[in-house]
Amino acid sequence: MRTSQTFNIDFIDEFKNKILLWGQQYDDVVWLDSNSYEQEYSNFDAILAVDAFTGIQTDYYQAFEKLKEYQIHTQDWIFGYLTYDLKNAVEHLNSANFDGLAFPDLYFFQPKKLFLVKGDTVEVLYLKCVEAEVAQDLKAIEQITTPNNSPSKDDVRIKLRIHKDEYFEKVTQMLDHIRRGDVYEANFCQEFYAEDTQIDPLETYNKLNKISKPPFASFIKLHDKYALSASPERYLKKKGQKVISQPIKGTAKRSVDLEEDRLLKSALLNDSKERSENIMIVDLVRNDLSKTAIKGSVAVEELCKVYTFNQVHQMISTVTADVDPAIHPVDIIESTFPMGSMTGAPKISAMQIIEALEETKRGVYSGAIGYFTPHGDFDFNVVIRSILYNASRQYVSYSVGSAITAKSDPLKEYEECLVKAKAMRTVLENS
């Protein structure tokens, strides 16, 4: 049984910085932050979940069945991630590429301590605690001083898993598949990495988040493994009977010149290739949602709307559906996983081709981070614009990708990847 206490906080941004720093004492941490980005479908401005009471870690085998059993057993708030490689639990696929990170395929935990931030109000939900514990923790948080100066770090030497010429060759192979009709669109990704490297995960996350300020930022600590995400994309949200998916397809760089920036945004909105990419994925998402939707309820609320973020302009669509209350929330996720924006169409064929051409196991990248509520609602992002770190292996990784269609120019796709990688590279090379 959770105790609930609500507080009004005068300096909420300072409080958010302090509770995230305070939470680092625990082995299990999930932090979700909307960065006050205005969006129609939002529940909280930020959430901190720490200190596992129970948890689940597993590989892909029967992963969704295990998660469903865990969610039914806890009937509580649970937080964690789904890796891209859970595709192997959904279809007859495999993940045989190199994996330098070694994250579990699925990880969730039931936190003892939970902070829900909305405006200047913080609701504190503790599990099986004595009354004085909340007051003690809030006093400890208040006394925290946030550091002004970043400690010095060793240089982070970024390497490319796929070099430029090889990237062109692989995109050309992807285009051959498209011309043969094997696939219409596929998201091809490449990894950037650093070995024998130590970083400060929280400092790195804070720098990445400050650069991007996205609506679906997240920080995960699982003992020695970290996910630092500046994601702009929602994968899937359930609130009551309504399910919402907001796939991103279409990217343009920003400019400091206001007129040039306006022109870049307008060009993205009217780019036939980018629109066709987005529309193909919208069709895929509509099909995925229809598997668990009440007949006739799938709707496209927004099509190819351009949103502006600190680093890029993005083309986003919003697809919704109503689901029968009898359908378990994990079944809704399983029937739509992995998300269309990170796979392609047709989905299974795209995933087979992706596995053959990519050099790295995706893992948490292009998976999802989020939570379930005690009532079976959920909200998950798409893990993009993210840095992954295994502290024990001293291995740092970030990946980027782009959608390949019949109209793709390999050079432009490569340049799009570099635009998406800019924030992660800047943060790591200036640590």
Image: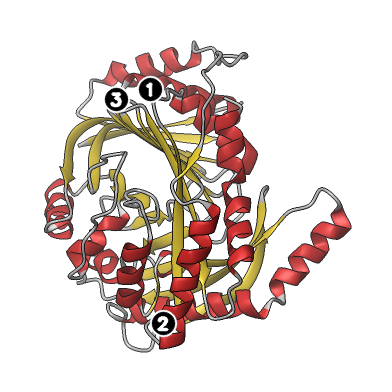
Residue drawn at x 11%, y 49% is 73
> In this rendering, would 331 be left or right of 383?
left
Q: Position of residue 26 (x, y in %)?
A: 30, 23
Residue type, label 1: Gln
Give the number of marks.
Answer: 3
Residue type of the residue flagged with mark 2:
Val
- Residue identified by numbered label 1: 24
First reached walking from the N terminus: tag 2 or tag 3: 2
Q: Position of residue 328 (x, y in %)?
A: 20, 66
Left or right, 415 with respect to 178, comes to right
Give the amino acid type for the residue marked by disc 3 in the picture: Ser
Question: In the rendering, at what x and y percent does residue 43 appear?
Answer: 46, 52
Q: Which image quarter holds the N terminus?
A: top left
Q: Which residue is mark 2?
A: 298
Q: Using residue 259 as the reference point, say whether residue 234 is left or right of it.
A: left
Residue 122 numbered mark, or none: none
The residues tagged by marks 2 and 3 sit, at their Cα atoms, a distance apart of 45 Å
- Compute the Cα span from label 2 to label 1: 41 Å
From the image, tell me which residue sits under label 3.
Answer: 392
Residue 214 seen in this snapshot: yes
Say which quadrant the C terminus sits in.
top right
Relative to 97, 398 lies left or right: right
Q: Helix or strand or loop: what does disc 3 sit on?
A: loop
Q: Residues within 10 Å of mark 1 (few under 14, many from 20)?
A: some
- Give the quadrant of residue 377: bottom left
Q: Earlier in the sequence, mark 2 or mark 1?
A: 1
Element under label 2?
A: loop
Note whether residue 376 is visible: no
